Amino acid sequence: MMSIAATIRSPESATRGFANRLVALLLRSPLHGLIGKRTMLVTVIGRKSGQSYTLPVNYARLDDTILVVSRRNSRWWKNLRGGSRVVVHLDEADLPGFATVVENDSEAIAGGYEIFRYQAYRQTMSADKAREKTRGRVLIRITLAR
């Protein structure tokens, strides 16, 4: 007897997947300005599957370093543990980079969040408030290749 395996996705997961595909399409189009200046695409390779995954993320940039703060319960960043090559789509170009994850340094994670908040909204906050806002989050540092 043959069994049929089905993948069941939650409505939230299906909606998020559709939204990510729509944002990716816009970011690669002449309409990319509609999304904003702090959203880019990052492509990672699955550690187990070897498949490439591209998703939109909000970011801050300091010269050749890109900072991304992600929820700890997201799965995509786990492919970057131990360091990994990535490609970012930024300013209409695909740029290679190397990503590392900061998981257990609350000061570094809060610092990355503060930089993002300032660049995105020109808002500052206390270090205590930044640490509070980044509980349950990780920091991804992407160094762009020169």
Image (cartoon, rainbow, N blue to C red):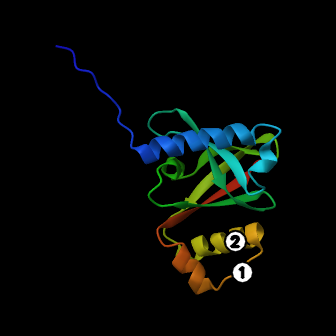
Circle 1 Cα neighbour tier, 10 Å, few/some/many (<14 / 14–19 / ≥20): some
In which quadrant of the rendered view does residue 69 lie? bottom right
Q: Position of residue 60 (x, y in %)?
A: 72, 62
Of mark 1 and mark 2, the one earlier in the sequence is 2
Can residue 137 be seen here? The reply is yes
- Above or below residue 49? Residue 75 is below
Q: Which mark is residue 117?
A: 2
- 93 vs 11, nearest the viewer: 11
Q: Is residue 80 left or right of residue 57?
A: left
Name the residue beneath numbered marker 1: 124
Q: Position of residue 14 (x, y in %)?
A: 47, 40
Image quarter in which the N terminus is found = top left
Element carrying mark 2: helix
Element carrying mark 1: loop
In which quadrant of the rendered view does residue 93 lie? top right
Amino acid tagged 2: Arg
Residue at 71 percent of width and 49 percent of height: 40
Q: Position of residue 61 (x, y in %)?
A: 76, 61
Q: Label 1 vs label 2: CA separation?
A: 7 Å
Amino acid tagged 1: Thr
**Tag 1 and tag 2, C-beta contact below 8 Å:** yes
